Image: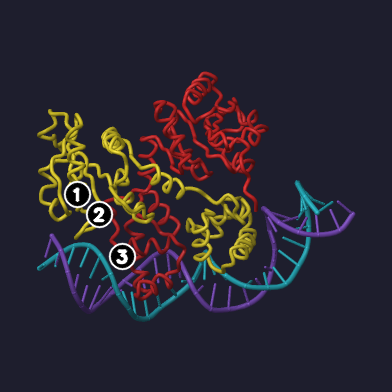
Chain colours: A yellow, B red, C purple, D cyan
Amino acid sequence: MMTFVSPYSKSMETRVIIIEDDQTIRDAFTYLINRTDGLKMVNSYSSYENAEPYLVSDFPDVILLDIELPGTNGLDAIAKIKKKYHSGQIIILTVYENETSIFKALSSGASGYLTKNTPSSKIIESIKEVMQGGGPLSANIAKMVIQSFRKSQNSPLTKRETQILEGIAEGKSRTKIATELFIDKETVKSHIKNIYNKLDVNSKEDAIRIAKQDKLI
Amino acid sequence: MMTFVSPYSKSMETRVIIIEDDQTIRDAFTYLINRTDGLKMVNSYSSYENAEPYLVSDFPDVILLDIELPGTNGLDAIAKIKKKYHSGQIIILTVYENETSIFKALSSGASGYLTKNTPSSKIIESIKEVMQGGGPLSANIAKMVIQSFRKSQNSPLTKRETQILEGIAEGKSRTKIATELFIDKETVKSHIKNIYNKLDVNSKEDAIRIAKQDKLI
DNA sequence: TTGTGGATCACCCCATTTGGGTGAATAGAT
DNA sequence: ATCTATTCACCCAAATGGGGTGATCCACAA
């Protein structure tokens, strides 16, 4: 497989495009980008549909993408862009800080997530970060992402119970869990009974759901 | 429950402590913090054991914590600090960018994660971010965190198969999955057979493991 | 000292689940 | 016209899961 070299590579410029329905914001970003050395706003579009035919020929290094978009929304646009044009890094712009859309965007392949009120110096910095292999996140977005990792500090479950519940959540059978923990499968069963009591459930499925919901595992 | 008000609150200063075994770094951070308006380095310690008795009386807003620490390592220190002293935000300092230690630190309750080569302006900025409820992450750390969310773009599984595998990973029975997808349980079984074939496994557990490992779910 | 909670194990029951086999109909895309 | 995705059917036997009701041992606290 050959490496495709940008026809613009000698210019050393970072090529940026923006897909955003608000013209004022488009213009503001265009101004901001173009007045910065090393950055160039190649084109701006008001919807994914408008941008789609030019994705490849624009040859962008960075794609600024609004989430709230008419037609194809930003979330779906990420997947479509990734399919049509692999080389660009996508940075999401948003006004709403919706937890699920953040995670969907990141899992679809966005490289960064910025709120629109981010100061312009930060925007430029973020574009440069992404070009250097970094992952820009606004402080508030980063907080949400960090919190998504955080486990409950006061779990009702003991260490052993947590260990066993983790095994269950990994789809392991009681027998397998017992072997891995060097205990009898009857012991595992006892622990599971205690877990079910504490969580007030009576099935694997419910236990896993509650445990993930309360961040016990 | 009463709210405990800091005896220092009228000063409006952000109280910082650092736990870090390298004295040069300790001194550098102390200098950096104290020369910044609104920040004050209350104390610095070379190990968690040394810091532990003063955690409460220091009343820190922000705790800068090294991961590679003699005695109690930084990861374990997070949990102990959280137990002894709830009010402070913990920012991790590290030279090594180890994926698992990042996630362990965040799940133990760290509010931010910075590499030691972070420029001093960024450090100050991060402390302020954390005080405003943000979550500071170095660009490279943020990238790793973001990538941990990313799903495989070219999964061997179809949408339906992915859907069913997700159900399995949530501990649901075939019957339950069938009901939720409005299809027969025999159909679910067929899909599972295809999933097992594609992933080259022959059990729930292995399917889940491979799927998570390859980020198919 | 007497609990209480955590972790360990044993044996009862039996419905449900799981994994493997083989085969087939339909619709949609290449 | 072929391939894939999706749907369903029926065979089988072993394993698993959930609910009981017990017991022992140990550590740590009231």
Q: Are marks 2 and 3 in contact (CB under 8 Å)?
A: no
Q: Residues within 10 Å of mark 2 (few under 14, many from 20)?
A: many
Q: Nearer the viewer, residue A104 or A1?
A: A104
For this view, does A19 lie left or right of residue C10? left
With C18 as the anchor, is B86 left or right in this view? right
As helix, strand or loop, the secondary structure at mark 1 comes to strand
Give how far across and how far down residue B29 sits, in percent: 49, 24
Image-quadrant location for residue A123: top left
- The residue where tag 1 is placed is A19
Task: Please determine if labels 2 and 3 lie on a single subunit.
Answer: no
Residue ID at (60%, 35%) = B8
Question: Can you say whether A18 is above or below B13 in the image?
Answer: below
Judging from the image, mark 1 belongs to the subunit labelled A
- The three-letter amino acid code for the residue at tag 2 is Gly
Q: Chain of mark 3?
A: B
Instruction: Quickly name the residue at label 2.
Output: A74
Q: Tell us which disc is closer to us: 3 or 1.
A: 1
Q: Which residue is mark 3?
A: B160
* Image coordinates for residue A217, horizontal then vertical, percent: 52, 53
